Image (cartoon, rainbow, N blue to C red):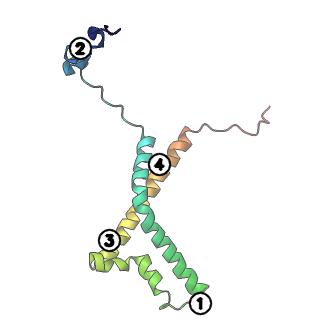
Amino acid sequence: MASPLSSAAMALPNESSSPSASPAATGPRPQPRPQPLAARLRRAHANLAPLVLAPLLVTVLSGMGYRLLRDWGGLSRDSAHLLMVMHEGEWLKPLLGPQGESVYVLLNGLGLLWMLATGGGMVWQRLRRTPPTSGSGGDT
């Protein structure tokens, strides 16, 4: 007995004969629209944030710990020296040589400036976009 679907109905159309399959028939692709500044700032901020977060946290927490433990905890300079080694990046000297400390301070500072600049740019974009609120409503 013959199948309800004929072999001609089951055959797939020849893809090479389709005009949409030809690269010449599709034409050039349109260029993507440039992203607005706010989107580019968000992307740049988000891309660098994971790299900057850990060193900044080490610097902030060790610096605060050093000062507070020295002033309020009564620790001597020698007792709190490990925190200052972490704070200043001296622990990188065995890994990066004598310039390890300077590299750490430089990259930490540049990373912080980048995050402040891109974050400030995002805030500026948002403030410019937000319409001003009206007064207390008592204007008559």
The kind of residue on which mark 2 rests is Pro
Give residue 64's quadrant in the image: bottom right
Sooner in the amino-acid sequence: mark 1 or mark 3: 1
Residue extending furthest toward the front = 1
Sooner in the amino-acid sequence: mark 2 or mark 1: 2
Residue 58, how many percent across, how many down? 46, 71
Indicate the quadrant containing the C terminus: top left, top right, bottom left or bottom right.
Answer: top right
- The residue that mark 4 highlights is 121
User: Residue at 21% across / 19% down in the picture?
Assistant: 22
- The residue that mark 3 highlights is 103
Q: How many marks?
A: 4
Dot 1: element: loop
Give the side of residue 72 with respect to residue 108, left or right: right
Dot 2: element: helix
**Closer to the camera, 67 or 58?**
58
Classed neighbour count for the residue bearing mark 3: other residues with Cα under 10 Å, few (<14), some (14–19), many (≥20): some
Classed neighbour count for the residue bearing mark 4: other residues with Cα under 10 Å, few (<14), some (14–19), many (≥20): some
Instruction: Identify whether 10 is placed above or below 83.
Output: above
Dot 3: element: helix
**Real-space Cα distance between discs 2 and 1?**
82 Å
Are the residues at dot 4 and dot 1 in contact (C-beta closer than 8 Å)? no
Sooner in the amino-acid sequence: mark 4 or mark 1: 1
- Give the label, 4 or 2, closer to the camera: 2
**Closer to the camera, 108 or 48?**
48
- The residue that mark 1 highlights is 74
